[in-house]
Image (tube, rainbow, N blue to C red):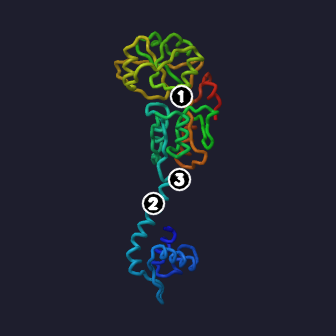
Amino acid sequence: MDVEALRTLVCVAETGQFQAGADELGISQQAASKRVATLERQLGVTLLTRTPRGSRLSLDGQVFLPHARRILAAVDQAERSIRPGSRPLRVDVLHRRIAPAQAVYRFYRAHQEKPHLDAVTLGDENAAQAAQAVREGTVDASFRALPNDRVPAGIRAERLLDAPLELLVGPGHPLAGASRVRPTDLAGHRIWVPGIRPGTEWGAFYQALSETFGLSIDALGPHFGDEALMDALAESPSLATLVGGGDRYLWPETHDLRRIPLHQPTPVYPHMLLTRTDDRHPVLTALRDHLRATGPRLPDDAWVPAAWAERI
């Protein structure tokens, strides 16, 4: 059923004349008459009856008109829902405790008139799958460490959120008293990063980190969540993990965990903002500007794997 024919019928019925209805729609009287006639043929009934004073609805037309109005209202609502800025910006932040989620949260908090956005986590998807979700419109944006040579067509990748890594240990760890450590100082210590999976970008990142500095990084054993990881670190004199400088983890005060910056060089996890090249959502523009203005300054001694070295 032609939506414009329904719109024409409603206009003519409300104005009482084909010419007046046509004028309101910005079409000719002949075009308006043709639209209504086509609609009547499709339905097999007469909807409008011409009179010396104009046009009036037939009995069938009177029954049909409320339904036509509801259809048009639904169409108008559907169109409004997808206009830029009319729906929330849907952003994949990967994990709610790490830097991207915290950055998006700060962006939201920074505006008195709150941006229309929705933060989701596609934690089970790797970078390529997240980029595909962006391209298909499942989400508007995603934060992923996607290597430069793997950015698919139609996707814009921008390094707007570099996260320097920090060592996290319990009070009994040999490095617990250090104010900062070098990556090479971690050789011989077990670094447990539960959740690393083959085929993920974070798996590739930690593999490159361990190979470059001779580290022992593993994800052995079950992962019972962040709270269990904090418990394990507090109890162990040898276990350590790595977290991003902007990550937000909480633990009981009695755990006395220590966050120790890395330097010479500073390993940096390169979160890239993935968006469609044709996405014009106004909140996305505002988010991009916010990240550029407030993102952490890249350390002079920053290290990232070669695949991510070039800033886009």
Mark 3 secondary-structure assignment: loop
The residue lying toward the viewer, choosing from 187 and 138, is 138
Q: Which mark is residue 77?
A: 2
Residue type of the residue flagged with mark 3: Pro
The residue lying toward the viewer, choosing from 188 and 196, is 196
Residue type of the residue flagged with mark 2: Gln
Query: Is disc 1 in contact with disc 3, using a CB cutoff of under 8 Å?
Result: no
Mark 2 secondary-structure assignment: helix
What is the residue that sits farthest to the bottom in this orientation? 52
Q: Residue 80: x, y in percent?
A: 48, 58
Residue at 52% x, 29% y is 200
Q: Earlier in the sequence, mark 2 or mark 1?
A: 2
Any part of residue 138 in sight: yes
Q: Earlier in the sequence, mark 2 or mark 3?
A: 2
Residue type of the residue flagged with mark 1: Gly
Instruction: Report the quarter where the C terminus lies.
Output: top right
Residue at 60% x, 23% y is 303
Q: Which mark is residue 84?
A: 3
Q: Residue 254: x, y in percent?
A: 34, 18
Q: Which mark is residue 199?
A: 1
Say which quarter of the image contains residue 131.
top right
Residue at 35% x, 22% y is 252
Residue at 53% x, 53% y is 84
Is 53 on the left or on the right of 304, as rendered?
Answer: left
